[in-house]
Amino acid sequence: MSPRPGAREEVRDAAREDVTVSGEELIISKAALWRNDMPSFRDFGFGAGAGPANVAVTIHRRSSGATQPDGLESSVLPYIVALHVIRVNQDPPATPTTEDFPPDSPISSHFAWAAPPTLFSKTDDVAMAAKEGGFFVSASAEKGDALELSAWHGPRWGSLRNGLDDMIDYVAVVEFEEGVFLKSKRQRLQIVH
């Protein structure tokens, strides 16, 4: 999903590390953005190491008392609009502003996945949903006290191969209806070689 112009600043400035949505106090307890650059037999020599990043984010209740007995999947998931990753470290040296690049460029600064058109769970064909791209999938965790969001085909950060791969920091942001943004702590892109 290509973020609209100015969306990066709006998301970054409005995001908080804890928010209340539908009566639930929420935090992001885990965020991971990674690329698998391990060559496989079918990929060998054909773009190995040039794939997009994937993301996994876990939203957790801050308080132990649930306001909805069914868990976050029913109380919070319907209000999620998008899942964002925003690059927060400095732009690579001697390059123009990253706002001018498409979201899958190695030097872009913002990538977002929209909420799925229908709600998927891990029991559905996640591989098919992931190949469609453009949206995230969700699953309930920890007896309803947590919600895991996963997305594939994200930014191509870390494919520069010029020594900057291990210095890409980001925050994950979950966007809810009415302009509420929940962000993770600063994280580092993981690249599996």
Image: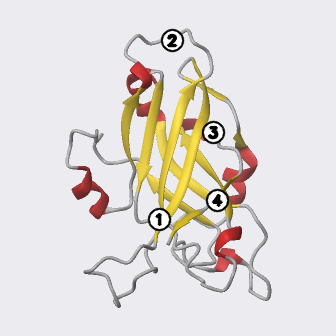
Q: Residue at 67%, 74% (x, y): give it.
A: 99
The amino acid marked with disc number 3 is Leu
Q: CA distance from mark 1 to mark 2?
A: 32 Å
Q: CA distance from mark 3 to mark 1?
A: 19 Å
The amino acid marked with disc number 1 is Gly
Percent x, y for residue 124?
Answer: 21, 43
Q: Mark 3 against mark 1, which lies toward the viewer? A: 1
Return the residue at label 1.
Answer: 154
Q: CA distance from mark 2 to mark 4?
A: 30 Å
Q: Secondary structure at mark 1?
A: loop
Return the residue at label 3.
Answer: 182
Q: Residue at 26%, 50% (x, y): give it.
A: 126
Q: CA distance from mark 4 to mark 1?
A: 11 Å
The amino acid marked with disc number 4 is Ile
Rate crowding at label 3 as few (under 14), some (14 to 19) or many (20 or more) other CA atoms within 10 Å: many
Return the residue at label 4.
Answer: 86
